[in-house]
C-alpha cells in the first residue's frame, strides 16, 4: 500500500488522543484538516472506497472519538475557579 491509500490507513493514528494537539483550538484545526483531507482524497477518486472501507470507517470513528476528547479537554475544571478572598480576611506572606 502506497500513496493516498497509505495516508488514509494511517490517519486514524494521528487522531489518537496522545496525538491530538493539547490546545483545543489547535486540536479542532487538526480534526478539521484530517476530515477535509479524507473527504478530498475520496472525492478525487484517489482511493477506492470499497477497498478502503475499513480504513475510512476507522478514520470516521477516530474522528468522532477525537471530537469527544477535544470537547472534554475544553471543559473548565469544576472547582478550579478561585473564590475571591472574603472581606476583611488577613493577607499573610
Image (spheres, rainbow, N blue to C red):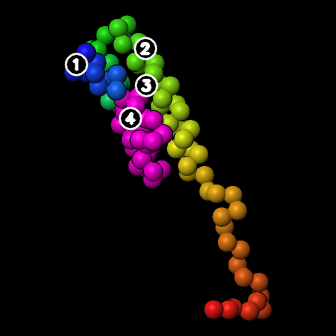
| Residue at 45% from the left image edge and 51% from the top image edge | 22
Of tags 4 and 3, the one toward the viewer is 4
| Residue at 41% from the left image edge and 19% from the top image edge | 56
Q: Residue furthest top?
A: 50
Local packing at callout 2 (Cα closer than 10 Å; few below 14, some 14-19, many 20+) is: few
Q: Are marks 1 and 2 in contact (CB under 8 Å)?
A: no
| Residue at 78% from the left image edge and 92% from the top image edge | 88
- Secondary structure at badge 4 equals helix
Residue 23 percent location from the top left of the image = 45, 53
Q: Is residue 84 above or below residue 24?
A: below
Q: Are marks 1 and 4 in contact (CB under 8 Å)?
A: no
| Residue at 69% from the left image edge and 91% from the top image edge | 91
Q: Which mark is residue 87?
A: none
Local packing at callout 3 (Cα closer than 10 Å; few below 14, some 14-19, many 20+) is: many
Give the number of callouts. Answer: 4
Q: Quadrant of the C terminus?
A: bottom right
C-alpha distance separating marks 1 and 3: 17 Å
For label 4, the residue is 14
Image position of 4 (left or right of 93): left
Q: Is residue 40 visible?
A: no
Segment colored magenta: 11-36
For label 3, the residue is 59
C-alpha distance separating marks 4 and 2: 16 Å
For label 2, the residue is 54
Amino acid at each position: 500500500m502506497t500513496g493516498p491509500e497509505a495516508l488514509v490507513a494511517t490517519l486514524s493514528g494521528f487522531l489518537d488522543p496522545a496525538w491530538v494537539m493539547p490546545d483545543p483550538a489547535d486540536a479542532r484545526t487538526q480534526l478539521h484538516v484530517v476530515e477535509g483531507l479524507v473527504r478530498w482524497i475520496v472525492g478525487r477518486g484517489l482511493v477506492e472506497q470499497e477497498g478502503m472501507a475499513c480504513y475510512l470507517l476507522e478514520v470516521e470513528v477516530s474522528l468522532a472519538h477525537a471530537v469527544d476528547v477535544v470537547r472534554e479537554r475544553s471543559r473548565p475544571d469544576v472547582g478550579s475557579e478561585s473564590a475571591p478572598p472574603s472581606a476583611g480576611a488577613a493577607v499573610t506572606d
